[in-house]
Image (cartoon, rainbow, N blue to C red):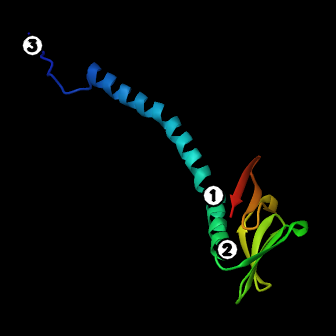
Amino acid sequence: MKKYVLKNSKGFTMIEMLLSLSFLLIILALIPLLIKSLYLFKDNAMDHTHFELMMFRKELSDEIKESTIKLDNAQNRIKFINETRSTEFTLLNGKIIKTINGRGNITLINNVKTFQVDKISNETFKVFIIIRKGDKELYEEIYF
């Protein structure tokens, strides 16, 4: 009579299987959260509205320094005049554009619904802007 002996072969034990299954479940649970956060980041990364507003504020502050200001509320226009040049900010076709000495067409802000400039006092002006951002509207007031 022959004796058969089973060799102890290295295999995948039940504990190893449970550990690998738990790691797999943790990874699968994190994937939807990762996709959602990437989707939100993509929307913020593709939106240039806040950068455009920051640049518009900078342009206004640069022009104010040594200029006299003329308002034209009927045509949504503000004009800065100094000794060497005149700079004009105008709402045209849903964009705020900048022209220098009547030439050029520099787009500063896109998707503008309203651009209104009001004189508060002799030295204080208010710029009110409504920007369309998808199905929402962004309201911005700038005092200078």
Location of mark 2 (residue): 64
Q: Residue furthest bottom?
A: 84
Q: Secondary structure at mark 1?
A: helix
Marks 2 and 3, how far apart at CA:
105 Å
Q: Nearer the viewer, residue 108 or 75?
A: 75
Disc with the residue nearer the chain's start (1 vs 3) = 3
Which mark is on residue 50? 1
Which mark is on residue 37? none
Q: Secondary structure at mark 2?
A: helix
Q: For residue 130, which quarter of the picture?
A: bottom right
Type of amino acid under label 3: Lys
Q: Nearer the viewer, residue 91 or 78?
A: 78
**Crowd tier of the residue under label 2, counting other residues whose Cα lies within 10 Å: few below 14, some 14–19, many 20 or above:** some
Question: Where 22 falls versus 136 (above or below)?
Answer: above
Q: Quadrant of the C terminus?
A: bottom right
Disc with the residue nearer the chain's start (2 vs 3) = 3
Which mark is on residue 2? 3
